Image (tube, helix red, strand yellow):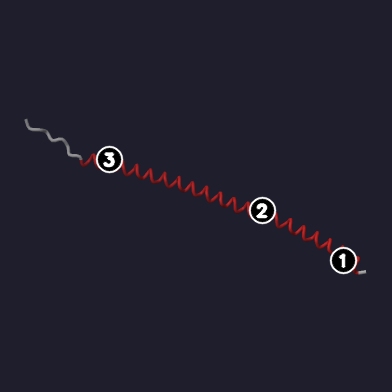
Amino acid sequence: MKAKYLPLFFALFISLTMFAQSDNGGVKQDTKDAAHSTGQAAKKTGRKVKHGTKKVVHKGAKATSKGANKVEDKTKPSPTPQPE
C-alpha cells in the first residue's frame, strides 16, 4: 500500500522544488538589475562631478587672470615727460 503513494510523493516534491527555483531566478535577476542601475548612477555622478570641477577651476583661473591684469595695470610705471 505504501508503494502506491511513493510516486505521488516524488511528483509533489519535484513540482514544489521547481516552483521554488523559478522564484529564485526572478530575485537573482532583480538583484543584477539593481546592481547595474547602481553602477550606472555612480558613473553618471562621477561624470557630473568631473564636469562641475572643471567648470569651477576654469572660472577661478579666469578670475585670477582678471585680477592679475588689474594689478598689472596699477603697477605699470606711468610715462614720465621727457625734458626738452
Rounded to the nearest whole Å, what is the CA distance between mark 1 and mark 2?
35 Å
Which residue type carries mark 1? Leu
Which residue is disc 3 drawn over?
A: 69
Rounded to the nearest whole Å, what is the CA distance between mark 3 and mark 2?
60 Å
Left or right of 49, for residue 32: right
Left or right of 68, for residue 13: right
User: Looking at the rendering, which quadrant does residue 6 occupy?
Assistant: bottom right
Which residue is disc 1 drawn over?
A: 6
**Residue 14 or 40: which is nearer the viewer?**
14
Task: Please rate how many residues cluster around mark 1, counting C-alpha atoms within 10 Å: few if below 14, some from 14 to 19, many from 20.
Answer: few
Q: From the top left corner, tell me how far across and down residue 83 is, in percent.
A: 7, 32
- The label shown at residue 82 is none
Q: In which quadrant will I find the C terminus?
A: top left
- The label shown at residue 29 is 2
Nearer to us: label 1 or label 2: 1
What secondary structure is marked by label 3? helix
Image height check: is 8 above or below 34? below
What secondary structure is marked by label 2? helix
What secondary structure is marked by label 1? helix
Image height check: is 22 above or below 77? below
Q: From the top left corner, tell me how far across and down residue 40 is, in percent.
A: 56, 49
Q: How many marks?
A: 3
Check the image and name the residue furthest to the bottom.
2
Which residue type carries mark 2? Gln
Check the image and name the residue furthest to the top.
84
